[in-house]
Amino acid sequence: MIHFTSSTYKKFFYLYISIILLLLIIPLDGTFRLSSVYFGFRSDHIVHCMIFAPFMILCYLGRIAILPRILLIYGFIFASFCESLHVFIPYRNASIFDLLANYLGIIISFLILKLAQRFRLIPILDA
């Protein structure tokens, strides 16, 4: 198993944030068809959820935040910020359902983090 230092995870975290922000501002011009429905969910909502899933783990391992409530606050703020940017970009539309999908991705990431800590798959960091 490869072990990275917290500074390496911090770099991965900032790269991840940069990629998400880049995806927010580039026009996709209908290159992706995300209106299909799987298991009762629109595919664009599933994509939103999956995009925000790594946030908590990278934030934790990069020691951006360690305390659970701070992790959740950072995650919800970042998800809200990303969706609120859609208001200012003319070719994007803000949607409450996209925001809820972002939140769901953050919550799933948090639960995965807690399970990984419980089964000692990742270290438990001290505050």
Image (cartoon, rainbow, N blue to C red):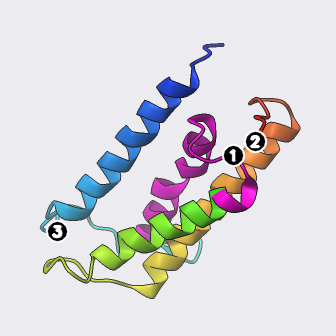
Q: Residue 8 carries which label?
A: none
The numbered mark, 2 or 1, whose residue comes first in the sequence reads: 1
Q: Which mark is residue 30?
A: 3
- CA separation in Å, label 2 and label 3: 45 Å
Instruction: Name which quarter of the figure residue 87 lies in.
Output: bottom left
Q: Does the magenta stretch include residue 32?
A: no
* Above or below: residue 48 compared with residue 9: below
Image quadrant holding the C terminus, namely top right
Q: Which of 108 and 14 is in front in this view?
A: 14
The image shows residue 51 at horizontal and vertical percentages of 45, 55
* Above or below: residue 117 compared with residue 72: above
Front disc: 2 or 1: 2
- The reply to whether callout 2 and callout 1 are in contact (CB within 8 Å) is yes
Q: What residue type is labelled 2?
A: Ala
Q: Is the magenta stretch mostly helix, strand or loop?
A: helix
Q: What residue type is labelled 1?
A: Ile
Question: Residue at coordinates 84% horizontally, 30% vertically from top-left?
Answer: 120
> Badge 1, how many Cα within 10 Å: few under 14, some, many 20+?
some
- The reply to whether callout 3 and callout 1 are in contact (CB within 8 Å) is no
In this rendering, would 106 be left or right of 79?
right
- CA separation in Å, label 3 and label 1: 39 Å
Give the farthest residue toward the right: 118
Span shown in magenta: 43-70
Q: Does the magenta stretch include residue 51?
A: yes
Q: Which secondary structure, mark 2?
A: loop
Q: Nearer the viewer, residue 62 or 40?
A: 62
Image quadrant holding the N terminus, namely top right
Residue carrying label 2: 127
Residue carrying label 1: 66
Q: Which secondary structure, mark 3?
A: loop
